[in-house]
Image (cartoon, rainbow, N blue to C red):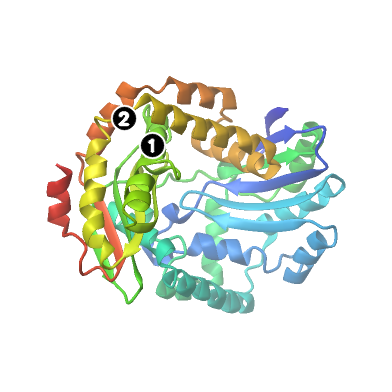
Amino acid sequence: MLKTSQLSNGIRVITDSSETAESVSLGIWVSVGARYEPKHLNGISHLLEHMAFKGTTTRTAFEISKEIEDVGGMINAYTAKTMTAYYVRVLKENLNLGLDIITDIVQNSTMDKEELKKEKGVVIQEINMQNDTPDDLIFDYYAACAYPDQPLGRTILGTIESVNKIESEDLLNYIHTQYTTDRMIVSASGAVAHEAFVEACEKLLTKVPTLETQNALPASYRGGDKRVVKPHEQVNLILGFEGFSYNHPDYYAGSILASVAGGGMSSRLFQEIREKRGLVYSIYAFNSSHTDTGTFGIYAGTGEKEVIELMPVLCDEINRLSDSLTEEEIARAKAQLKASVLMQQENISSHARTNATDMIVHGRVVPKEEVIAKIDAVGKEQLEKIAARLFKQTPAFAALGPVQHVMPYNEILARLK
């Protein structure tokens, strides 16, 4: 049963209780991430997420992990462009312990200077690992191409240079100015009693600053061409277009179109480009959204020689989407999306995360029935219209690896017309 409350300091609390659950997944979501960072502090949200586990005024780093693992629980965190999350999963009898630790690391982390030196090294290793993972790295290049010279186009991890410049005082100031009550959501799912949980949150979350915080800078999609030559075995590439925000009336249509184009082994791109022609190892389409913008993109991983044939075929398949959709493939795409939504109902960790994300994006938890109804309401005519409109825009194209034979950008533009 879903319930929401607001603490006296303004922090929102969501619970999604289950009488049959033996465990509880709970966490704190803060609606601030890489998109909120000034350029010289790029990567601070992610570094802060790491440092939150390195000791508080009452617990050492070892004690944080030991207390959770002593009861068989797990603790973790993640950073995104627009949010940072800290969460635990424990058995129901250890709910209070999990909440105590999560609220402790969010409010009382010391940002010790010696620990910071070590953790910078860890993050720099993570950056280097990302640089050695081309199918991940290409998404950073794509974002920089779609949203150049703005926070949304910068990497979540930051750069080695920017991370090295961040000091303990920067981290503490970032917490005090960005981790505020209006941006903080506590979400729990599973074996949790709402009233008791809210009461516990009220007692524990007393040190969160109550300040007026600024919104992220508006996004400005531009598109363009970015190619990086590296001695890889494969070419990794993304071809994308300005898409839809979460609140755009065509958001669900965009997701369905992405599923038709490249949402699984039965999708058009997989069948035509991988199965029939053998031109790629991996290919898929995605509909990526934020509160004020989004992109519709297609990722492919291919060989240096295969890319010569791939790009014309890919452009032709994109062109076909606006006038050759069938009711059968639309129905299949809808079924995939609805199944994804409903299957999340069976995972309490997904519940907690989805509820918190809904609250950040929409200001409310969106009922699953409403999501299903919006998916069902999308028709063939709407899909054809948005496909025609999407692909007339300036594309964002990024390629990484042995890119010498990749179709020139101006030829991609001509082929898409």
Establish if 170 lies above or below 83.
below
Q: Residues within 10 Å of mark 2 (few under 14, many from 20)?
A: some
Establish if 292 lies above or below 399.
above
Residue behind mark 1: 260
Name the residue located 53 percent from the left edge and 71 percent from the top edge: 123
Label 2 sits on a secondary structure element that is loop
Give yes or no for contact between labels 2 and 1 (Cβ–Cβ under 8 Å): yes
Q: Quadrant of the C terminus?
A: top left
Tell me which label, 2 or 1, sits earlier in the chain.
Answer: 1
Residue behind mark 2: 325
Label 1 sits on a secondary structure element that is helix
Name the residue located 18 percent from the left edge and 59 percent from the top edge: 407
Q: Quadrant of the N terminus?
A: top right
On the rendered structure, is 185 left or right of 410?
right
Name the residue located 55 percent from the left edge and 40 percent from the top edge: 357
On the rendered structure, is 281 left or right of 178?
left
Identity, as a three-letter code, of the amino acid under mark 1: Val
111, 273: nearer the viewer = 273
Q: Position of residue 50 (x, y in %)?
A: 60, 65
Establish if 131 lies above or below 345.
below
